[in-house]
Amino acid sequence: MKLVKVFLSVIFVLHVSGCAVADCKPEVGRVLPGTNTAVVGIFLDKDGIPKETVKEVIVHPGQNVLYAGPDEFKIVFKNKKAPNRVVSNSSKDGVVLIKIPKNIFERKEFVEEFRKNNSLVFDYSIWVNGKEYDPPIRVVPF
């Protein structure tokens, strides 16, 4: 797990350093090419507020969202609505993995929302040191 954290940290640093030069921040995070995983870096701004490297994460059923950041943080889904049925997801060695079920659109609690919007939105908070930041995850069909 330490090797995975180091690898993801290197990718994150290279991504952020590349964007720092161009003064950019991707609006939407997506699955990395050739994988089923979107990687989201979590960092603290100058005021200690947690932030992520993207404003919104868009994934498909059967894919994953991997959050890498401080050693201790939580991903907490709001309104008891979570894609993985776990409302509070604590980091382990600075990593949280959220798996999006392949049958998510068929789950009874999501059928109506998917029918109306052709997607599902999961609101959550990133908690670090008692401070919160809350971007969404959007699950869309292929």
Image: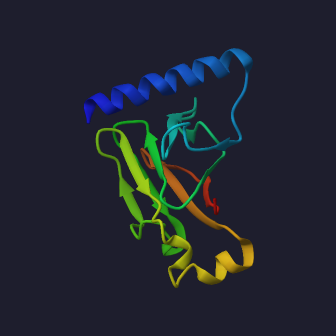
User: With respect to residue 79, does 77 lie above or below?
Assistant: above
Q: Residue at x 50, y 50 (%)?
A: 126
Q: Is residue 28 left or right of residue 42?
A: right
> Who's the residue at 50% across and 40% down the image?
39
Residue lying at the far top in this picture: please name it: 21
Rendered view: 129 above or below 46? below
The relative height of residue 92 versus residue 17 in the rendered view (above or below) is below
Q: Position of residue 87 (x, y in %)?
A: 42, 67
Q: Quadrant of the C terminus?
A: bottom right
Residue at coordinates 29% horizontally, 39% vertically from top-left? 93
Q: Where residue 85 sits: x, y (%)?
A: 41, 71
Quick check: 91 left or right of 54?
left
Q: Quadrant of residue 111?
A: bottom right
Toward the viewer: 97 or 72? 97
Left or right, 21 with reference to 81? right
Quick one: 40 or 135, which is closer to the camera? 40
- Residue 26: x %, y % from top left: 69, 35
Q: Nearer the viewer, residue 33 or 110?
A: 33
Q: Is residue 83 above or below residue 131?
A: below
Q: Residue 103: x and y, percent? A: 48, 72
Please give left or right for residue 66 compared with residue 136 in the image.
left
Q: What residue lies at 51% left-to-right and 71% top-to-bottom?
A: 104
Which quadrant, please, contains the N terminus?
top left
